[in-house]
């Protein structure tokens, strides 16, 4: 099956309590998309119009296909803010914590659905045990996150000396962290092993998936800006997901959360299409658009930017074409359920190759929305 996790991995439930929706991953289920909030939030950000905007953006991410939303929690005040937010939304929120076990303990007092820690940097064995015991009592899963740039000192020395490959070092570090959980009898855990190297990311996850039934969160870290980041993540994720490796994914970008979610959706759908050789119907919105050229009489770039997030948030299984001229319009995009293109000083809206409306450019946005609602 395409775009699913390792069939041998165990299933985890994230959320499903209080106001929080339940998300299931692992066990061959379809991979769950996640992203990470880009800015630090304060209590004032959760009040009034700004609070409504935060909640609306989270709801928008959910509609676009995001299943998990992670937040950096660098101190106890950030834990309090995230705790408040977790009571205001239904999407499972994840607390990303380093160094201070007290932050993890406080997060577990709220309906925060999952925490991300590394037992090795949380402050010692006794502190790690305290976090694990509270997570077990509250039925909260933990993700162990291992990054190539922050390996334990002894493993880093072996990599630097050439006695250990980077991918193998990631696996060794992850297995060391997992061993701590095994000692505590805690199995509600998953792992990520990320590197900025596509090759190391692929190899590390392949090795780990062969050795363990622990679910995997996969992606390329520090992947770069939009274009470079999408290319690098796509290369790694298409390889891994095509082999059934990856129970949840994040396309890490120096860009918006929405673009991370869109990129992840497109990667998952591409894996499904490759697996089904085009026979399996596509899920959700598919946008096709021309690159624009000197023939263009319609600004496809601006229209796509205006509509992209709204389209991906719609619960429809359709193809939308945004084309620049009559050459690329109804004919080349005749497979589209709805499309829009320029024709001289007019704009055409078409469906399955047939023009259904001819309008002035100033009417394009409203007319397109009307026809979209009719589908």
Image: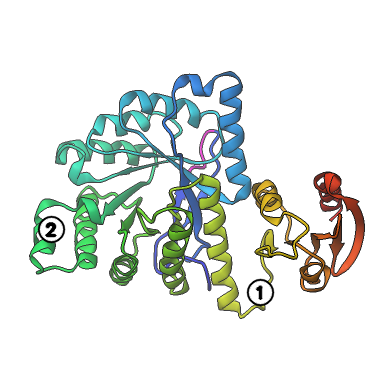
The residue at the far front in this view is: 294
User: Which residue in the structure is indicated by mark 2?
Assistant: 155
Circle 1 sits in a helix, a strand or a loop, which is it?
A: loop
User: Which residue in the structure is indicated by mark 1?
Assistant: 280
- Please state if 19 lies on the left or on the right of 301 as rendered: left
**Magenta stretch?**
14-18
In magenta segment, residue 15: yes
Q: Closer to the camera: disc 1 or disc 2?
A: 2
In the displayed structure, 352 sits above or below 178; it is below
Quadrant of residue 339 within the rendered picture: bottom right
Q: Residue at x 41, y 70 (%)?
A: 240
**Residue 208 seen by the camera:** yes
Q: Residue at x 30, y 51 (%)?
A: 145
Number of other residues with Cα within 10 Å of mark 2, as a class: few under 14, some 14 to 19, many 20 or more:
many
Please provide percent x and percent y for residue 250: 45, 54
- Please state if 129 lies on the left or on the right of 364 as rendered: left
Labels 1 and 2: the sequence-earlier one:
2
């Amino acid at each position: 099956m395409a775009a699913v996790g390792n069939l041998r991995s165990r299933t985890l439930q994230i959320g499903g309590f209080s106001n929080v929706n339940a998300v299931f991953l692992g066990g061959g289920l379809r991979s769950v998309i996640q992203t990470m909030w880009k800015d630090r939030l304060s209590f004032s950000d959760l009040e009034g119009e700004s609070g409504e905007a935060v909640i609306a953006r989270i709801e928008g991410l959910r509609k676009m296909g995001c299943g998990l939303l992670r937040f950096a929690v660098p101190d106890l005040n950030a834990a309090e803010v995230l705790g408040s937010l977790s009571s205001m939304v239904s999407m499972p929120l994840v607390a990303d914590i380093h160094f201070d076990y007290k932050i993890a303990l406080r997060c577990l007092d709220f309906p925060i659905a999952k925490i991300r820690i590394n037992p090795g940097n949380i402050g010692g064995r006794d502190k790690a045990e305290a976090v694990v015991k509270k997570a077990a009592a509250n039925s909260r899963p933990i993700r162990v996150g291992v990054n190539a740039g922050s390996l334990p000192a002894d493993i880093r020395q072996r990599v630097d000396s050439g006695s250990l490959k980077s991918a193998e070092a990631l696996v060794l570090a992850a297995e060391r962290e997992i061993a701590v959980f095994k000692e505590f009898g805690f199995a509600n855990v998953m792992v990520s092993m990320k590197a900025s190297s596509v090759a190391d990311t692929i190899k590390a996850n392949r090795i780990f998936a062969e050795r363990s039934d622990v679910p995997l969160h996969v992606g390329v870290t520090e992947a770069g800006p939009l274009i470079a980041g999408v290319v690098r993540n796509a290369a790694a994720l298409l390889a891994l997901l095509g082999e059934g490796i990856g129970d949840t994914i994040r396309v890490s970008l120096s860009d918006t959360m929405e673009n991370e979610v869109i990129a992840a959706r497109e990667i998952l759908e591409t894996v499904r299409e490759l697996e089904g050789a085009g026979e399996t119907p596509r899920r959700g919105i598919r946008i096709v658009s021309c690159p624009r050229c000197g023939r263009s009489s319609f600004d496809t770039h601006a229209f796509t930017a205006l509509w992209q997030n709204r389209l991906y948030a719609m619960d429809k299984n359709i193809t939308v074409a945004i084309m620049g001229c009559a050459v690329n319009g109804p004919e080349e995009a005749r497979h589209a359920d709805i499309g829009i293109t320029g024709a001289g000083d007019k704009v055409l809206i078409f469906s399955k190759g047939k023009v259904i409306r001819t309008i002035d450019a100033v009417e394009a946005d409203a007319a397109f929305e009307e026809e979209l609602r009719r589908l």
